[in-house]
Image (tube, grey):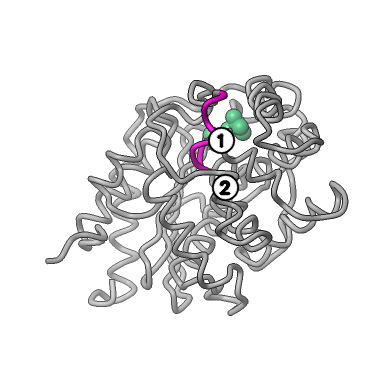
């Protein structure tokens, strides 16, 4: 990216946007009506460099709920609240190879959910957020997101209520974890916080800035505020690299080679450490629940600029 001028980089993003606008495969998630209502043609690509330059194409201001892209960031807050050693006793860092909402590897022989990027691990992670009551825990979480995006963020109430009303599988996993001693009491409060974190509203530009903050070692390139303690950035990027794209994480690591996280509403963030954050938003998903255009855009960007973390040419 450094070698090309900003206008050439923007032109390349515009070209990717044109190319993949015609990609009509994939389906919008439909598990709740608020999310099923998304326009399948929404499409945005944004990038923010570590020195704060912003590149944006398409529907970059369209708001949507962050969903699973919240998971690494809440994990970061849990690390700050308790330290790495303790958090590792409560949530592992092992990829599952199973769908994000799988219940299959939660059994009495395991001491903790496998990783913080699948739902079970994310719910256990939410249970670690400190605060004297639900309001304080929610406010601390929202303050954390604010440090990454540089402005106040809000919970979409109708999505939150729908998630809470229909999230039977998440609720089942939380109670199973309570029974196994993997999370402590107040299961309904923990679930509420998890559903609230999934329902935080962002646009593609916010996501690019969040990714850029990780690329910039935890400091927001626009506000210069530290969003995450420096020594935890590596931990977030590691779990994103191995577990961030659901049961597509291995293929993504092989082909794109960047720490990333996807969400069921069609966002993907990818981090180029020391260089920039990338975000793509397009609600049409492939079979594992990742944005189809998002995958293709990131694949092309990685190849074109040699961004794979293990590419040495
Ligand atoms: N909120 C949904 C759930 O918990 C979807 C999370 C996601 O983006 N995969 O099932």
Residue at 49 percent of width and 27 percent of height: 28
Residue at 81 percent of width and 55 percent of height: 131
Task: Indicate the quadrant where residue 192 lies.
Answer: top right
Could you say where residue 295 lies in the image, as x and y percent from the top left?
34, 42
Whether 116 is among the magenta residues is: yes
Gap between marks 1 and 2 measured at Cα? 8 Å
Of residue 267 and residue 166, the one placed in the foreground of this image is: 166
Q: Secondary structure at mark 2?
A: helix
Segment colored magenta:
108-118
Could you say where residue 288 lies in the image, as x and y percent from the top left?
40, 28
Q: Is mark 2 within 8 Å of ligand 1?
A: no
Residue identified by numbered label 1: 111
The vertical placement of 167 against 271, above or below, is above
Could you say where residue 232 lies in the image, as x and y percent from the top left?
52, 65
Residue identified by numbered label 2: 89
Residue at 66 percent of width and 59 percent of height: 82
Quadrant for ligand 1 reads: top right
| Number of other residues with Cα within 10 Å of mark 2, as a class: few under 14, some 14 to 19, many 20 or more | few
Whether 172 is among the magenta residues is: no
**Do the residues under discs 1 and 2 have CB atoms within 8 angstroms?**
yes
Task: Indicate the quadrant where residue 228 lies.
Answer: bottom right
Of residue 254 and residue 183, the one placed in the foreground of this image is: 183
The vertical placement of 74 against 170, above or below, is below
Could you say where residue 32 lies in the image, as x and y percent from the top left?
64, 24
Of residue 242 and residue 51, the one placed in the foreground of this image is: 242
| Number of other residues with Cα within 10 Å of mark 1, as a class: few under 14, some 14 to 19, many 20 or more | some
The vertical placement of 299 against 164, above or below, is below
């Amino acid at each position: 990216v450094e070698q090309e001028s900003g206008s050439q980089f923007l032109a390349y993003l515009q070209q990717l946007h044109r190319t993949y606008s015609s990609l009509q495969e994939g389906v919008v998630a439909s598990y709740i009506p608020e999310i099923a209502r998304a326009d399948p043609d929404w499409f945005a690509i944004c990038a923010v460099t570590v020195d704060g330059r912003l590149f944006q194409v398409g529907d970059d201001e369209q708001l949507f709920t962050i969903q699973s892209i919240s998971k690494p960031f809440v994990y970061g807050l849990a690390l700050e609240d308790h330290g790495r050693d303790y958090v590792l006793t409560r949530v592992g860092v092992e990829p599952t190879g199973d769908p994000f909402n799988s219940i299959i590897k939660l059994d009495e022989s395991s001491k903790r959910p496998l990783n913080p990027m699948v739902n079970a691990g994310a719910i256990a992670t939410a249970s670690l957020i400190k605060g004297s009551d639900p309001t304080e825990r929610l406010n601390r979480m929202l303050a954390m997101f604010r440090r990454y995006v540089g402005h106040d963020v809000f919970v979409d109430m109708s999505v939150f209520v729908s998630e809470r009303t229909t999230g039977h599988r998440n609720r089942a996993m939380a109670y199973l974890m309570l029974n196994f001693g993997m999370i402590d009491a107040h299961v309904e409060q923990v679930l509420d916080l998890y559903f609230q974190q999934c329902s935080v509203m962002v646009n593609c530009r916010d996501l690019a800035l969040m990714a850029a903050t990780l690329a910039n070692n935890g400091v927001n390139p626009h506000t210069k505020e530290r969003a995450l303690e420096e020594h935890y950035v590596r931990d977030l990027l590691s779990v994103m690299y191995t577990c961030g794209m659901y049961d597509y994480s291995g293929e993504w690591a092989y082909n794109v080679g960047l720490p990333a996280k996807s969400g069921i509403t069609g966002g993907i963030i990818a981090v180029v450490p020391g260089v920039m954050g990338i975000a793509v938003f397009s609600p049409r998903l492939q079979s594992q629940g990742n944005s189809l255009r998002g995958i293709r855009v990131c694949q092309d960007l990685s190849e074109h600029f040699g961004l794979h973390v293990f590419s040495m040419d």
